[in-house]
Image (cartoon, rainbow, N blue to C red):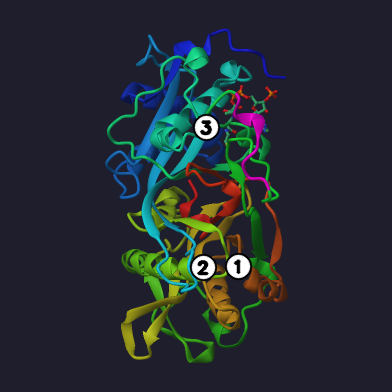
Amino acid sequence: MMSESSIPLSSLTIVPATPDQQIEFMKRSYPQWGKPKGWSFETYKGLGEDWNGREACKAGRFVLWVLTKRDELESVNFLCSCETFLRPAIVVYPNDSDTLTNHKVENVTGYGIASVFTPPENRGKGYASHMMRLLHWMLAPLNLFHHGQEEFPREVWGDPPKMPGFVREAKFSVLYSDIGARFYVRLGPTPASNAGGAGAGSGETDLGGWIARDTASTVWKVDDSKVVGAFEEKNKLGYNFSHVEASENLTWKWLDETLLKKIWPLDAKLAVSEMARESNTSSKIRVAFSPEEGVGSFMVERYKLDWEKLEPIPTHWGLCKIAQPGDAEELDVSVFATWTLTQLPGQGYSLGITRLRCPPHLFKGLFNEILSYAKAYSNVKEIEVWNLAQELRGVADDMRGNTYEREEHLPSIKWYGSEDVGDVDWALNERFCWC
Ligand SMILES: CC(C)(COP(=O)(O)OP(=O)(O)OC[C@H]1O[C@@H](n2cnc3c(N)ncnc32)[C@H](O)[C@@H]1OP(=O)(O)O)[C@@H](O)C(=O)NCCC(=O)NCCS
């Protein structure tokens, strides 16, 4: 049962962490997220420092926030903390004419929120709840005010938090809950925002906070899955990453880190036209993170400490169709997959597919390549993909993929536009934008 904070909420605010507060956060969270991986504290601390140099995190894109007393803004005794990642995003509005053209496409900012953490001695006092409610006002104050949705509750919370210059007005924010769907869904921008109302008709209950969406995982056990046909012989270490002649006369190109970066602008462009096409048959607004600006590649960079222990050290992170046989340079992102490799607690590694675009008739061929890659490492035990497209689920099933509702990392969205969240579809809700 949650006990009331002895500190009045009006005396608290949220600010970006100072360097000392950042170190304090690393100390506090090490037992939760560093030690179980077998890392030393220095290694764990280094990871945070390394992220700051990555494209997805540079120039104020990655921020640690702390909830602290207004008169102790720089204190290392802050009450709780969380991280945000600023990311490029796309919104495609449904067209409202009969022409099925002229979709309004907006390039917007979205935020990913991560590492919500209250130290054990401060838990159960409502601090994380208050911090998350305040965070809406940090990330989207103009959207909230302008749409007349909310008024900042000064009488109970005091003055609104001050938005630093590096924050960009967000159209939406997401998080990936490890504590179920119920905690975050209640945390709207005001104390009373759990009154509900919006979202009616969508089958979702909008209590003002982050709503879980598309939580399915499909998992293949690598040892139980057979690589078929032409791929069988590649089940060896020392895999040759030259082009592979595959089924349907396709030629694949393996993606090293350099080619991976080339994929993302092509993928983003095609995604916009797909979203526009899909909105011809739906009245919903479609919103997606873009994999550009380092976002798509971050999943590889983020897990370096995990995968660099594999032998040989992995160098390839995806597979893409080549547009013209004989022209290895032109990539055709109508068929591709990317991935990262993460350590499973005590059970080897998981190959996590981060982006996937593939028509059903080519999925077996593409999956076989991924499987043969996974099998080249004896300790890669499973392949997992989030929110596999409905039209691929039957094929996945035939290939012994097990699709189920995950209980952790639940993608959850808060929409800051004036529209009902029930009228908003989260497109490309895949692992590439996990944080
Ligand atoms: C989750 C966490 C941030 C909550 O912080 P807090 O300041 O205690 O949160 P609040 O006081 O605002 O709310 C407490 C509520 O959190 C919820 N909660 C906490 N841990 C939970 C868990 N593992 N599963 C489900 N709900 C949980 C409960 O509803 C709890 O209510 P209760 O006190 O009636 O049991 C804190 O427990 C923590 O840091 N845990 C470890 C890190 C973590 O799991 N972070 C979340 C990642 S998504």
Q: Is residue 260 left or right of residue 364?
A: left
88 shown above or below 397: above
Secondary element at image label 3: strand
Q: Is residue 317 visible to the viewer in this orientation of the structure?
A: no
* Residue occupied by mark 1: 389
Earlier-in-chain disc, 1 versus 3:
3
What distance separates the C-alpha of mark 1 from that of mark 2?
9 Å
Q: What residue occupies the far front of the structure in this picture?
A: 97
Q: Quadrant of the N terminus?
A: top right
Query: What residue is drawn where x is 39% and y is 35%?
Result: 142
Between the C-alphas of marks 2 and 3, the distance is 29 Å
Q: Position of residue 155 (x, y in %)?
A: 50, 13
Q: Residues within 10 Å of mark 1 (few under 14, many from 20)?
A: some
In which of the image's four quarters is ligand 1 placed?
top right
> Contact (CB < 8 A) between labels 1 and 2?
yes
Q: Which residue is mark 3?
A: 116
Label 1 vs label 3, nearer the camera: 1
**Residue at the spot x=33%, y=24% of the render?**
18
In magenta, the rendered stretch is: 192-200
Foreground residue among 300 and 242: 300
Taking the spot 36% from the left edge, 78% from the top edge, the residue there is: 331
